[in-house]
Amino acid sequence: MVSERATRTTPFAAMDVLERANRMDDAIHLEVGEPDFETPNAVTEAAVAALRAGETGYTSSKGKPELRAAISAYYDRQYGVDVDPARIVVTSGSSPALLLAFSVLVDPGDEVVLTDPHYACYPNFVRQTGGRISTVPLSAADGFCPRVGEFERTVSGDTEALLLNSPANPTGAVLDGATLRELVELADAADATVVSDEVYHGLTYEAEDHTALEYTDDAFVVDGFSKRFAMTGWRLGWLVVPEEYVGHVNRIAQNTLICAPNFVQSGGIAALESDDDFFGGVRDTYRERRDFLVDEVEDWGMSLDYTPGGAYYLLVDVSDLPGDVLEQRSRASRTSSGKAFDAADFLLEEAGVATTPGPDFGANAADCLRLSYATSAEKLVEASERVQRALETVELSTAD
Ligand SMILES: Cc1ncc(COP(=O)(O)O)c(C=O)c1O
């Protein structure tokens, strides 16, 4: 019999849209959260050299000591924080790091607090451990930044973990240092543990990144190479673990993951050592794309009441689009209904522009679409023209 846990695991809508878009000839992809930059050359060269040098066996389950030392040096350089390499566990991407964190923290029935909206996969990580999800609402009026008061209303003695994410997927919102500190203190007072997903650090356009480790040694910090080094397919990430949990995390990692690929870890060392060259240009490019798209969506009849400060996403509200027309004109056969799905179908089928329907990210994104600007400026210009042309036909049919 299929386990209840498996049947309760929901599909990842962005991936479903991606599959449909890939079957079309020239769809423009605004649905996926994957950098369109190439991995820095120095990283590829280091991994190839490692392969040639025969670095193909298992490594320690916590990762190569040189990589863990490089990650520790990165915390020192980037945030002025001292992290003992013994507390760092290297993983195959940040996704297994999330799974490890929840595996050691959560028993069936334990409460995990998430924001709403949140990264679509978070509830499924919690479900794998049998945890119970409570959510803290975020609003566009606040730029989707969490209010500490909302957390105070939700976090209780029953809360085991608080999952934070900045810069955030799907909103691009960035948490300021003072708020992060207050949330860390609030978790501490409730005897709950912060799990801070910092995978979009480095892709912050105005403010500074702050790690939860600036305020506590008791947080789990999830991070990785996928986003800021354009290394999604390399599958390399890490988990910083509070000291008392290190042995427990390592036992689960030894048994279930064994280790991240050996030569890939050598690529990771090169990435951390060469990041300064890569970062500046990439960040400027994303910022320009964001500014372009923020201006354009106003002309699409969608609303965006905030300017996202990081990652490469906008969460736009489609409530003002004529739902009945979109519903009639969206031809996809699917089980989910609602304006966001109709709008995403319409844009894919009639404009050839793929977007992700908001409901995947929580009830507070029900009438939204997530747009990713991890695609070239030329494609963004074309996407905007196509969307405007397609939406003009909707206005015409409304006028009829
Ligand atoms: C917020 C967030 N966390 C974690 C991940 C997983 O990234 P990876 O497993 O590639 O490191 C993603 C991927 O999109 C994400 O958006």
Image (cartoon, helix red, strand yellow):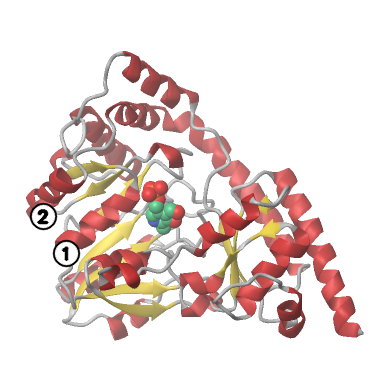
Quarter of the image for residue 112 reads bottom left
Local packing at callout 1 (Cα closer than 10 Å; few below 14, some 14-19, many 20+) is many
Name the quadrant of the N terminus. bottom left
Q: CA distance from mark 2 to mark 1?
A: 9 Å
Say what amino acid the circle numbered 2 marks.
Answer: Tyr
Q: Which residue is mark 2?
A: 245
As drawn, the label of residue 105 is 1
Which residue is drawn at the image coordinates 75% and 73% (left, top)? Answer: 301
Give how far across and how far down residue 45 sits, in percent: 43, 19
Depth check: 39 or 125 in front?
125
- Looking at numbered disc 1 in the image, what kind of residue is underneath it? Leu
Q: Identify the secondary structure beneath mark 1.
A: helix
Which residue is farthest right? 400
Q: Are marks 2 and 1 in contact (CB under 8 Å)?
A: yes
Beta carbon of the mark 1 residue lies under 8 A of ligand 1: no
| Mark identifier at residue 83 | none
Which residue is located at x 32 percent, y 45 percent?
A: 79
**Left or right of residue 40: residue 247:** left
Residue 311 vs 265, above or below: the answer is below
Q: Which mark sits nearer the N-terminus, 2 or 1?
A: 1
Seen in the picture, residue 361 relative to 267 is either above or below; the reply is below
Q: Quadrant of the C terminus?
A: bottom right
Residue 7 visible, this angle:
yes
In what element is the residue under mark 2? helix
Residue 78 percent coordinates (x, y): 35, 41
Circle 2: is it few (<14), some (14-19), or many (20+) Cα within 10 Å? Answer: some
- The x and y percentages for residue 119 are 43, 64
Residue 212 in the image: state x and y as whole percent: 28, 57
Q: Is residue 144 visible?
A: no
Relative to 87, is 124 on the left or the right?
Answer: right
Quarter holding residue 124:
bottom left
